[in-house]
Image (tube, grey):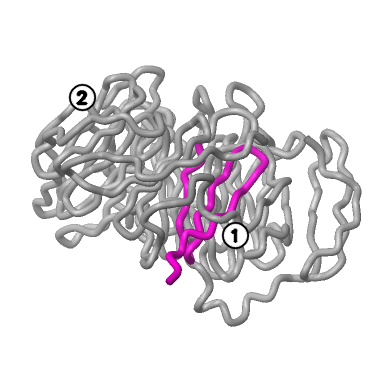
Amino acid sequence: MRFATVHMCLMTGLFVLFGCSQGESQVLVTGQPVSLADTEAAPYWPAFQGPRGDNISDDTGLLRTWPANGPRVVWTAEGIGQGFSSVSLARGLIFTAGNINDQSVVTALDLDGKIQWQTPAGGAWTDSHPGTRGTPTVDDDRIYFQNPLGELFCLEAATGKPIWNVNVLERFGSSNITWALAESTLVDGDRVISTPGGPQTAVVALNKMTGETVWQSPSAEGDLAGYATPTLAEYEGKRLLFTFTSKAIICVDADTGKLYWRVPHETSYDVNALKPIFRDGLVYVSSGYGTGSRMLQVKVAGNQVEVEEVWSNPELDNHHGGVVLWDGYLYGAKFGRDWACLDWATGRTMYSAPGVGKGSLTCADGMLYTLSEKSQMGLVAADSKSFEVVSRFRLPRQGEGPSWAYPVVCGGRLYVRHDNYLYCHDVRSRP
């Protein structure tokens, strides 16, 4: 896939996409700076799994069933590159990333699906399952994106202009993992959090304005990074970061980088990918290949933070499609084809049932939007008593490879990304 040399007249005006040959690094596709004024009412999903990081949309008044061929397609965007990044939305723009040529490229689209700018963000992952993994994070007037090779970029949201970048694997003496880094950048106040892992550190905080190191945690016994995005939580006077390394669950102090604990959690091929779920002192994690789910109780005692296991259940062994906590129950796909529901408090399996097939999900208006890795989209009521796909449709046969990107529901629209394409559906209920 290459940038094309072509003139395009878009809603924002006339601009040029500059041709690029293999190996060129300074490619910027842009037009007039996008106006970021009057964006308070704009759809807001500024990071992977949304504004709270819980993968639950605040949208209401949505369709309870879909037509046979799916909800109305508002638009289809092409040219976002090869990858599995989901989308973030803020300031009237949609952000995602993908491989174009030999580069990772961040793309901004308007709410009509028209590309506003595209900016290279370092090299591309072209080995097994090529493409980007992480989702861009919007913070005020800046975008933060870490590519699969560990290059963390800060860009202007309006124009895509690079502000700073750093390779966290090189700076902190670590190595990449089998299928490349998949972490979506977490912004915490004036810091950007990343998990390079390795013999020197586990988690680091960078100054979000300059990229300078603020703190780095001790190494978690040399573990390399996992594929997970960290979760930030406040509990009993502590601000804590929970994430996966390649072989463990860890807890780090968000203000100092102190490593409080490392709980071994090993799975096949070191695929620890779930973003931990935290609520009321409890941390939930899950991994695939039969490893299953675990619940940990966090205990704060003075300056120490300890942990003990509450329950485990091997049945819900989520690979990398995510798990949602809704109304006291956990919902997610098993490593096999079925979907499962667990009781948050006890870990008891409520059911295991077929759906659209193993995949990813999001939750909105009490409904689960389930996307199989084979491009089947299904709508399911979030009900702990039964699992029924009330509507389903198949994505167009345009993209290649598995459909691993998480779906997003925001502003009455369903966004589904597959490979080089982004599909926007209207899911609002109408009188």
- Please tell me which residue lies in front, 417 or 173: 417
Q: Position of residue 355 (x, y in %)?
A: 35, 33
Q: Position of residue 152 (x, y in %)?
A: 58, 47
Q: Position of residue 73 (x, y in %)?
A: 59, 54
Report the quarter where the C terminus lies: bottom left
Question: Residue sitting at 45 percent across and 39 percent down?
Answer: 371
Amino acid under disc 1: Ile
Amino acid under disc 2: Pro
Question: Residue sitting at 65 percent across and 42 percent down?
Answer: 98
Q: How packed is label 1: few (under 14 Cα within 10 Å), some, or many (20 or more)?
A: many
User: Number of callouts in the render?
Assistant: 2
Q: Identify the residue under disc 2.
A: 314
Q: How packed is label 2: few (under 14 Cα within 10 Å), some, or many (20 or more)?
A: some
- Please tell me which residue lies in front, 17 or 177: 17
Q: Identify the residue under disc 1.
A: 94
Please tell me whether residue 178 belongs to the stretch shown in magenta: no
Report the quarter where the N terminus lies: top right
Query: Could you say which disc has been placed on residue 383 in the image?
Result: none
Q: SS class of the residue under badge 1?
A: strand
- The answer to whether residue 325 is above or below residue 149 is below
Q: Report the span colored magenta.
A: 404-431
Q: Quadrant of residue 327?
A: bottom left
Disc nearer the start of the sequence (1/2): 1
